[in-house]
Image (tube, helix red, strand yellow):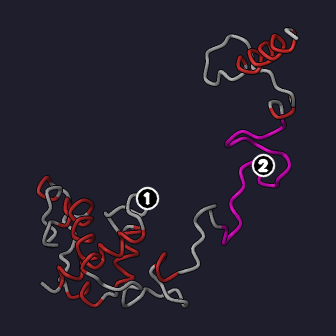
């Protein structure tokens, strides 16, 4: 009867000793399936005799979408209509909450270059950078909301893309703030 608890304790200790993830060891890890460690593969930028261009890295198939980036609502996620043209009006309703969020996000991401009033005289510009156009310039007054969304998402001229920093809904909130500054 005493052998069962001793065997159970020994089995428990054996199992728990294998659960030391991240622990330093001079021994190589044990793997039941070795082909996962020693599989044939090409390293980045490696040459390949299989393809006619001798490059192992392949360009994505045109129209491919990165996992997690598929959004059917083109109006909301891309700022364009079915024909691929920039939207004249944002696809979300302009609410007080949206305007408040837009003013906050504008102050964080846009103010350094565009200034709090959209006059292109932010703190970065005062240090020698080329000033951006003022928001109430005739050309910008004629542009649709989708144009501003696209500029925030992809950048234009000296302005970099902010898509990786600003979520989609916040970009539309910033567009609402730009419109408010245009009609001050």
Q: Which badge, 2 or 1, is on the more N-terminal residue? A: 2
Neighbor class of circle 1 (other Cα within 10 Å; few <14, some 14-19, many 20+) is few
Magenta segment, prevailing SS (helix, strand or loop): loop
Residue situated furthest front in the rendering: 1
Q: Residue at x 58, y 66 (%)?
A: 69
Tell how many labels. Answer: 2
Q: Which picture quadrant has residue 141?
A: bottom left
Give the answer, above or below, for where 159 lies relative to 75. above
Front: mark 2 or 1? 1
Circle 1 sits on which residue? 164
184 to the left or right of 67: left
Q: Which residue is mark 2?
A: 54
Q: What residue is drawn where x is 82% and y is 53%?
A: 51
Rendered view: 13 above or below 145: above
The picture quadrant where one finds residue 79 is bottom left
Tag 1's secondary structure?
loop
23 with respect to 120 (left or right):
right
């Amino acid at each position: 009867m005493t052998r069962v608890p001793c065997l159970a304790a020994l089995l428990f200790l054996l199992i728990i000793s294998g659960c030391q993830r991240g622990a330093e060891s001079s021994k190589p890890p044990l793997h039941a399936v070795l082909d996962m460690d020693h599989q044939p593969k090409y390293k980045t930028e490696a040459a390949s005799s299989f393809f006619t261009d001798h490059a192992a890295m392949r360009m994505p198939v045109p129209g491919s979408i990165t996992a997690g980036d598929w959004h059917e609502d083109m109006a909301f996620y891309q700022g364009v209509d079915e024909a691929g043209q920039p939207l004249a009006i944002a696809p979300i309703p302009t609410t007080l909450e949206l305007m408040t969020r837009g003013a906050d996000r504008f102050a964080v991401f846009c103010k350094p270059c565009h200034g709090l009033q959209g006059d292109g005289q932010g703190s970065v510009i005062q240090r020698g950078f080329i000033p951006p156009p003022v928001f109430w310039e005739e050309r910008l007054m004629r542009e649709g909301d989708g144009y501003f969304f696209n500029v925030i998402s992809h950048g234009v001229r000296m302005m970099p893309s902010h898509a990786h920093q600003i979520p989609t809904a916040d970009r539309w909130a910033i567009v609402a703030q730009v419109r408010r500054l245009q009609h001050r």
